[in-house]
Image (tube, rainbow, N blue to C red):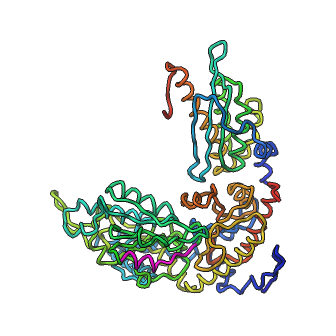
Amino acid sequence: MQLENMYQEIILDHYKNPHGRGLREPFEAEVHHVNPTCGDEVTLRLHVEYDAAGDPVVSDVSYEGMGCSISQASVSAMYDLVLGKTVPQALAAGEHFMTLMQAKGDPAVAEKLEDELEDAVAFAGVSKYPARIKCALMSWMALKDASVRALSANHPTAPTGGPA
Amino acid sequence: MTQTVSRPDGASSPAERRPLPLDVEAIRADFPILTRTVRDGKRLVYLDSGATSQKPRQVLDAERWFYENVNAAPHRGAHQLAEEATGAYEAARATIGGFIGAPEREIVFTRNTTEAINLVAYALSNAATAKEEEFRTYAVGQGDEIVVTEMEHHANLVPWQQLCERTGATLRWLGLTDDGRLDLSDLATVVNERTKLVAVTQQSNILGTINPLGEIVARAHEVGALVLVDGAQSVPHQPVDVAELGADFLVFSGHKMLGPTGVGVLWGRYDVLDKLPPFLTGGSMIEVVRMEGSTFAAPPQRFEAGVPMSAQVIGLAAAVEYLQALGMDAVEAHELAITGYALEKLAEIPGVTVIGPPDTVARGGAVSFTVEGIHPHDVGQVLDDRGIAVRVGHHCAWPVVRRYGVPATTRATFYVHTGYDDVDALVDGIRAAQKFFGTV
């Protein structure tokens, strides 16, 4: 059956027991993203601190949202993956996740990305269902958006881009 | 075959499987797509006709016939093909008009329901600046009001919001009751002497509700307002006669009534159409064109700029003939039987809540529901895995799902090829989803 392939145990675990859920302070950026085809939404806050080298580090991602198991599990797995990483590393993970979502279920792609994506590699099965890819990507898009805002808020000189 | 099942409350629900008015097996044989399988060899259970209907071979053959035999641009050229294409196109207009009891000259072809509604909305704002005095008759401006309902599809809401933004008019709306009906308690105040147009659906695409249009039309005409009826979900599923309806406009889509995509219909009372300025302008909608300016043709040509969707119009006429052969009374009765059966079966599943009228009184065959603890996307995924096609989401009626406090619903819609076996597959699928996600 195809269902178990998509709804991996890891996904269902994250869905039933989400990690990092809830909105917390402090935060430098808060974004609200919706999936207009289904009405799912997520509010996501990003808190960035700077390490000794002056690099921005994701010190908290907090969120609230409603949506299907895929969208809710995706944000939970993302929380685990990006916490403690530098912002560029977190965004790179987002790029890897995007690559996974474009793999059309190719197991070779998932295998290659296993180290980079940890639990999030379990979403490989989703990439076979075009209608569900947006569900998995919504939180990653929100994180990308929040990163741009948080960095421009913390570092007025940092390059800005994306939605203001 | 009569079957008795027990309900959770212990009472028995008798005679659910009443004999169906339509011969489902014979009808299915007309639909080539229903012979294909999906998701690893499973029978296709198509419960998404409300989004778009499947097409019988007769419709596909009609389109092919047009292209293979008479293809030419209607109303242009004097060669034999052009004559025959024009003849076929206009004959189709008569057939489609006859389906709703309207004369040919009141039938305007559009791309779909959405475009038909935009045509009227833009005509009403264009009216304000029309140089011909007659075209300013129905102009909408500041101080005027447009009335819709909270039940409308986005296609019958957003164009009116936009009309109000362009003209400074005010949008008002009739609300909903908890059981999925229009709340008409404030009809007399919401529809008042400032109202220019009331736009209302005949059958809700998400709740299934059939609205009491008579009362609304009477009030609107009492205050001199026009009435536009969205028939996208009613014309395909029940007999509709524009004289009985009493409205000024009726709009519907071909693709939801066994016809091709790319063709829709605006019916308008001729005396109203005649006083409206055009929406899209260009070829074939003109009377005289000079460099300094142009004058326009009479309806319906005034509203059909450019080479029309001829093959699709011919296909839609074939769809209409298919439905007429079945009989719209039989189509309506068939869907009512299926809907009643579905509502009873869904009521037997713990955790399933129908959003909309719980019985078949003044109700069509759009059945929206939620399954406790499982998001509609996930319900839809499990159903899809079993070959069952339903719609999930807000169904282009976001205010409706918001009104009932749910993020989205799962929706099953029925048509002439739907049988009790399709509903049984749906019910089994919902129970399988509950098992898969561990909510029971």
A47 displayed left or right of B429: left
Residue drawn at 50 percent across, 35 percent down: A163
The foreground one among A149 and B85 is A149
Q: Position of residue A81 (x, y in %)?
A: 73, 31
The secondary structure that most of the magenta stretch takes on is: helix
Residue A103 makes an appearance in the image:
yes
Residue drawn at 62 percent across, 21 percent down: A56
Q: Is residue B115 above or below residue B267?
A: above
> In the image, is residue A117 part of the stretch drawn in magenta?
no
Q: Is residue B35 above or below residue B438?
A: below
The extreme top residue here reads A52
Residue drawn at 68 percent across, 45 percent down: A71
Residue A107 makes an appearance in the image:
no
Indicate the quadrant where residue B439 lies. Answer: bottom right
Q: Position of residue B311 (x, y in %)?
A: 44, 70
The foreground one among B216 and B258 is B216
Tell me the magenta residue range: B209-221
Q: Quadrant of the C terminus of chain B?
A: bottom right
Q: Position of residue B35 (x, y in %)?
A: 69, 70
Q: Position of residue B399 (x, y in %)?
A: 54, 59
Q: Is residue B206 above or below residue A149?
A: below
Q: Quadrant of the N terminus of chain B?
A: bottom right
How many marks overall? 0
